[in-house]
Image: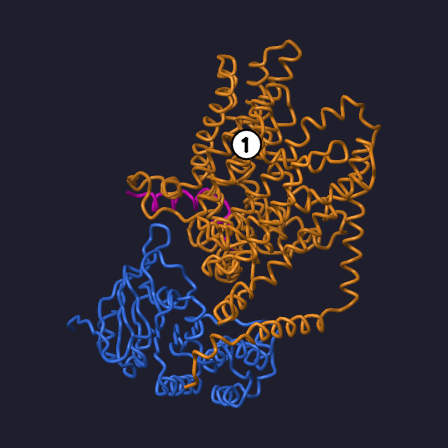
C-alpha cells in the first residue's frame, strides 16, 4: 500500500482541482453551439431592454419639487433600508442552511471529500457567485439611478454610480453574511432571529413606528447625489468586510447541509421554471428540513367514521413548530395589511391577499398530498372529487383559525369595538378565499407537457401562463373585498358593516362554487376532453383522474398501472364522480 | 447467538467512534455508539433497512454532522483534511460528472488524492472491472451497473487506509462482483481496513468481524457466519 500520509501535504492537489475544473469547462464549451449562445444574449438584451423601457415609462414625469425631494430624503433611506435588511436576513438564513453556494453533487462527493483544503475548493465557486451577483447589482443599480435622476434631478453620473454602488454593496453584504453563516455553521434559529429582528426593525422604521434602524443609515448611500452622509459609506465597508471574512471561512461549511442543498436546489429551480408551486413548496420544506413531528401535538381518537377528515387532522396535528409559527406570522401580516386597507391604504389588499394565499397553501396540506401521490389516490375505490372535497372542511377549519389570528392582529393595532365587529365579519370570507386560492393553485398544478395548448402561438400560451400564475392569488385576494367595500362605504357615508356583509356573503358563495369545482373537476375535464375529441383535436394528455399524475419526488407515475382504472368502460364511470360507486364504497370504508 | 463485544487487539485502531449519535429532528438514526476498528481489520455492517448502517458510514466519511459524540480516523476527526486523505468512501449511489469521461474521472480525481492520475494501476483496476472499452465514454450514458463500476474504480485506485463501502454489490453483474471481492481482498491484504455495509449474507463469511445494527444500536459485534447474520436481521 502507498504511503497515505504523504498525500495530505501534497500542495499540487489544488493544481489538480484547477485542472479538473478547466477540463470540465473545456468539455462544456466544446458542446456549446455559438448560435445558442448568441440567441441567449439576444433574448437577454431583448427582454432586459424591454423591461428598462417599460419601467422608464412608468417613472417618467416632472422633476419633484423641493418639498417632494425633502420627503424622499426623509422616507427613502428607511424604505431602502428594508432592502438591505432583507438581503442580510436572506443571506443569514441561506448560509445557516448550507448556502449560498449550490455545488454539483459530484463536487461534494469527490472534491470536498478529497484531501484538498475546502477553503481552496470553495473559494472559486464563492467568488464566481459573488461576481455574478455584484454584476447584476451594478447593472440594476445603474438602471435605477438613471430612473431616479429623471424625478429627483442632479448629476446623471452621480445617480448611476451611487445606484450601482448601493445595490452592489447590498448584494455583497447579503452574500457575505451568507458565507459567514455557512462557514461558521450558524444555527438556523439564530439566523432567523437575527435576520428577523433586523428586518422587523427596518420595516417598523419605514412605517415610522420606531426610529433609527441601522439599515436606514446605510441606505443613505443611495441618496448621496442629494445629500452626502459619510456614515452611509459604512455599507461598503461592511460589505467588503463580510465578504472577505466570509470567503476566508467558507471551508467550514457543513457537508450535510451542502449535499442536501445540492440535491434540492436544482429540482427547486426546475420546478420554479415549470411554475409548479406545489413542488416548490415541498422541496423548500425538504431544504429547510421541515419534517412532521414523530408524535402529534395532541393525540386524536379515530372511531372509523370520516376517514378522510381524520387522516387530515392527524397530518395537521403533526405539523412542526416552524410551520405553525410561519402560519401565525403570515396571519398577522394579513391582519395588519387589512387594517391598513381599513385605514385607507387600499393597495395593501394585495399584500393581505398574498398572505392569505400563502397561509392557504399550508392549510390545504392534506389535500395537496393527495395530488402529490395520484397513484395512491387512484388505488382508492372512490371518485377523485369525492376524496378531494372531503379534505376541504379541515382546510376551512385551519384557515378560520388563521383568520381569527389575523383579526386579532388587525384589532390589537388600535383596539375599538367597530374594528372588532368588522374583523369578526371578515374572518370567514378571508379564510375561505385563502383556502380556495390555494386549492385552485394545487389542483391546477404544472402545465402538462402533452397539453394541446402547446400547439398554440406563444402569445396565447403566454396569456394562459399569466392567467395560471395570477388566478389563484387573485382568488385569495377576493377574501379582502369585505374590508375594501367597508372602507369605500365608510368614505361614502354608507354603513361599512352592511357593505362588508354583502361582499363577504358573495365571497363565501364563490368559495362554495370552487368547492363544487373540486368535486366535479374530473367530470368537467372528461367532458372537455370528449368535446376536443369530437372536434378532432385529440384527447391530449392523460385521463381525467390521472391527468396531473406526476408523483412528486418520485417521477411520473406509471400510466398503465395507475391510470388504467380510470380509462374507458365501467371503471371510468365509477371513478369520475358517479354517485352509486361512491355510496357503495363509502359504506365499506366507513364501517367502524 | 450470544451477544459479545470484541475489543481489537494489537496496533492502534484506525477508526474510533466515541458516543457517536445522529438524529434527524426528533427521530434518532444512530444511538450513542462506541466502536473501534483495528488497522487492517475487515468488518461487515449488517442490519435492516433504517438500522443506521449508511448513517454510520456517512458520519465516518464526514458527509454527516454528528448530533453528539465524535468519530476519529487514525486520530483525526472525521471529515478533517487528514482523515479525508486516509478514507475512501464508496456510497451506494454512484455520483459522477456528466461531462467527464471515465478516464478523466480517474485522472483528475486520482490526482486530487496525490496519485499520478490514470496510471498503470488505474488501468489494471479498470480492466478487471470490465471498463476498458468504455474508458473514454461519458458515464452519463452508462447503466446503473456501469456507473457503479466507475465509482468503484475511482474509490479503489486512490490511496487509503480505511475503505468504507455501502452496498457494493448492488447493480453489479457476476464478473463485476467477483472482481470487486478480489480487489477488496487485495486492499485488505495490503493493510487497509474495510468497513462494508451489505445485505448480502454471503459476503459476511469473508469478513473477520460482523457488526449488526438495529434501530441505530449495536446488537451484535463479533465473528459471525451467514446463518448467524440471517438470524440477526430476520
Q: Quadrant of the C terminus of chain A?
A: top left
- Horizontally, is B165 left or right of A459 in the view? left
What is the quadrant of residue A433 in the picture? top right
**x, y percent for residue A434:** 53, 33
- Horizontally, is A232 left or right of A332 in the view? right
Q: Is residue A590 magenta?
A: yes
Magenta residues span A569-592
* Name of the residue lying farthest toward the front: A230
What is the quadrant of residue B160 in the picture? bottom left
* Name of the residue lying farthest toward the left: B2
Q: Name the residue under label 1.
A: A201
**x, y percent for residue B102:** 57, 80
Q: Is the magenta stretch mostly helix, strand or loop?
A: helix
Report the coloring of the rendering.
Answer: by chain
**x, y percent for residue A416:** 49, 13
Q: Colour of chain B?
A: blue
- From the viewer's side, name the closer residue of B27 and A107: A107
Residue A568, visible in the rendered structure: no
Q: Quick one: which chain is orange?
A: A
Q: Is residue A586 magenta?
A: yes
Residue A155, visible in the rendered structure: yes
The chain under label 1 reads A
Query: Quick one: label 1, few (<14), some, or many (20+) residues within 10 Å?
Result: many
Amino acid at each position: 500500500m502507498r504511503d497515505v500520509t504523504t498525500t495530505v501535504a501534497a500542495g499540487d492537489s489544488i493544481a489538480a482541482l484547477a485542472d479538473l475544473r478547466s477540463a470540465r469547462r473545456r468539455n462544456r464549451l466544446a458542446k456549446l453551439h455559438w448560435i445558442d449562445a448568441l440567441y441567449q444574449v439576444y433574448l437577454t438584451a431583448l427582454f432586459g431592454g424591454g423591461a428598462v423601457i417599460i419601467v422608464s415609462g412608468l417613472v417618467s414625469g416632472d422633476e419633484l419639487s423641493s418639498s417632494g425631494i425633502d420627503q424622499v430624503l426623509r422616507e427613502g433611506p428607511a424604505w431602502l433600508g428594508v432592502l438591505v435588511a432583507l438581503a442580510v436576513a436572506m443571506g443569514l438564513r441561506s448560509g445557516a442552511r448550507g448556502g449560498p453556494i449550490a455545488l454539483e453533487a459530484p463536487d461534494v462527493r469527490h472534491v470536498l471529500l478529497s484531501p484538498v483544503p475546502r477553503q481552496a475548493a470553495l473559494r472559486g465557486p464563492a467568488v464566481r457567485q459573488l461576481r455574478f451577483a455584484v454584476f447584476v447589482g451594478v447593472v440594476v443599480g445603474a438602471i435605477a439611478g438613471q430612473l431616479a435622476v429623471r424625478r429627483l434631478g442632479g448629476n446623471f453620473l452621480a445617480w448611476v454610480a451611487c445606484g450601482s454602488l448601493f445595490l452592489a454593496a447590498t448584494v455583497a453584504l447579503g452574500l457575505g453574511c451568507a458565507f459567514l453563516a455557512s462557514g461558521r455553521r450558524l444555527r438556523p434559529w439564530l439566523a432567523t432571529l437575527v435576520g428577523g429582528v433586523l428586518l422587523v426593525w427596518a420595516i417598523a422604521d419605514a412605517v415610522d413606528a420606531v426610529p433609527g434602524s441601522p439599515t436606514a443609515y446605510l441606505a443613505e448611500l443611495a441618496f448621496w447625489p442629494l445629500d452626502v452622509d459619510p456614515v452611509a459609506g459604512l455599507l461598503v465597508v461592511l460589505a467588503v468586510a463580510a465578504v472577505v471574512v466570509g470567503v476566508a471561512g467558507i471551508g467550514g461549511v457543513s457537508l450535510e447541509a451542502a449535499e442536501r442543498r445540492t440535491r434540492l436546489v436544482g429540482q427547486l429551480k426546475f420546478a420554479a421554471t415549470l411554475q409548479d408551486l406545489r413542488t416548490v413548496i415541498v422541496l423548500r420544506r425538504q431544504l429547510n428540513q421541515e419534517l412532521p413531528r414523530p408524535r402529534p401535538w395532541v393525540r386524536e381518537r379515530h372511531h372509523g367514521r370520516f376517514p378522510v377528515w381524520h387522516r387530515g387532522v392527524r397530518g395537521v396535528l403533526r405539523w412542526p413548530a416552524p410551520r405553525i409559527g410561519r402560519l401565525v406570522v403570515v396571519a398577522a401580516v394579513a391582519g395588519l395589511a387589512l387594517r391598513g386597507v381599513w385605514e385607507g391604504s387600499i393597495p395593501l389588499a394585495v399584500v393581505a391577499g398574498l398572505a392569505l394565499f400563502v397561509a392557504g397553501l399550508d392549510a390545504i396540506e392534506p389535500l395537496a398530498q393527495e395530488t402529490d401521490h395520484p397513484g395512491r389516490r387512484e388505488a382508492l375505490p372512490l371518485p377523485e372529487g369525492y376524496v378531494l372535497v372531503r379534505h376541504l372542511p379541515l382546510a376551512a377549519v385551519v384557515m378560520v383559525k388563521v383568520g381569527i389570528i389575523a383579526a386579532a392582529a388587525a384589532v390589537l393595532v388600535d383596539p375599538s369595538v367597530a374594528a372588532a365587529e368588522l374583523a369578526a365579519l371578515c374572518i370567514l370570507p378571508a379564510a375561505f378565499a385563502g383556502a380556495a386560492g390555494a386549492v385552485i393553485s394545487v389542483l391546477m398544478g404544472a402545465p402538462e407537457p402533452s397539453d394541446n395548448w402547446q400547439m398554440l402561438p406563444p402569445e396565447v400560451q403566454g396569456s394562459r401562463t399569466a392567467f395560471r400564475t395570477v388566478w389563484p392569488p387573485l382568488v385569495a385576494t377576493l377574501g379582502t373585498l369585505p374590508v375594501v367595500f367597508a372602507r369605500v362605504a365608510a368614505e361614502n357615508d354608507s354603513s361599512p358593516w352592511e357593505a362588508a356583509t354583502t361582499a363577504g356573503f358573495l365571497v363565501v358563495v364563490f368559495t362554495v362554487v370552487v368547492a363544487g369545482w373540486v368535486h366535479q373537476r374530473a367530470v368537467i375535464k372528461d367532458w372537455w376532453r370528449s368535446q376536443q375529441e369530437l372536434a378532432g383535436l385529440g384527447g391530449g394528455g392523460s385521463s381525467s383522474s390521472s391527468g396531473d399524475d406526476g408523483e412528486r419526488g418520485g417521477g411520473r407515475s406509471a400510466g398503465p398501472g395507475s391510470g388504467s382504472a380510470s380509462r374507458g368502460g365501467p371503471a371510468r364511470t365509477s371513478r369520475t364522480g358517479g354517485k352509486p360507486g361512491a355510496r357503495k364504497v363509502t359504506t365499506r370504508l366507513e364501517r367502524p | 447467538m450470544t451477544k459479545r463485544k470484541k475489543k481489537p487487539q494489537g496496533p492502534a485502531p484506525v477508526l474510533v467512534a466515541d458516543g457517536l449519535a445522529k438524529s434527524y429532528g426528533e427521530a434518532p438514526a444512530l444511538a450513542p455508539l462506541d466502536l473501534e476498528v483495528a488497522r487492517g481489520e475487515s468488518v461487515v455492517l449488517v442490519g435492516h433497512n433504517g438500522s443506521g448502517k449508511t448513517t454510520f458510514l456517512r458520519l465516518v466519511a464526514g458527509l454527516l454532522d454528528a448530533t453528539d459524540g465524535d468519530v476519529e480516523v487514525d486520530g483525526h476527526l472525521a471529515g478533517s483534511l487528514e482523515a479525508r486523505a486516509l478514507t475512501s468512501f464508496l456510497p451506494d449511489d454512484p455520483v459522477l460528472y456528466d461531462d467527464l469521461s471515465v478516464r478523466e474521472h480517474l485522472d483528475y480525481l486520482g490526482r486530487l488524492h496525490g496519485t499520478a492520475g490514470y496510471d498503470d494501476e488505474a488501468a489494471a483496476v479498470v480492466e478487471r472491472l470490465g471498463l476498458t472499452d468504455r474508458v473514454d465514454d461519458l458515464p452519463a450514458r452508462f447503466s446503473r451497473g456501469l456507473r457503479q463500476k466507475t465509482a468503484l474504480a475511482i474509490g479503489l485506485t486512490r490511496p487509503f487506509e480505511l475503505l468504507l463501502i455501502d452496498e457494493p454489490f448492488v447493480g453489479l453483474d457476476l464478473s463485476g462482483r467477483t472482481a470487486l471481492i478480489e480487489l477488496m481482498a487485495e486492499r485488505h491484504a495490503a493493510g487497509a481496513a474495510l468497513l462494508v455495509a451489505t445485505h448480502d449474507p454471503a459476503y459476511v463469511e469473508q469478513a473477520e468481524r460482523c457488526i449488526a445494527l438495529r434501530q441505530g444500536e449495536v446488537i451484535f459485534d463479533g465473528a459471525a457466519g451467514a446463518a448467524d447474520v440471517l438470524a440477526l436481521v430476520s
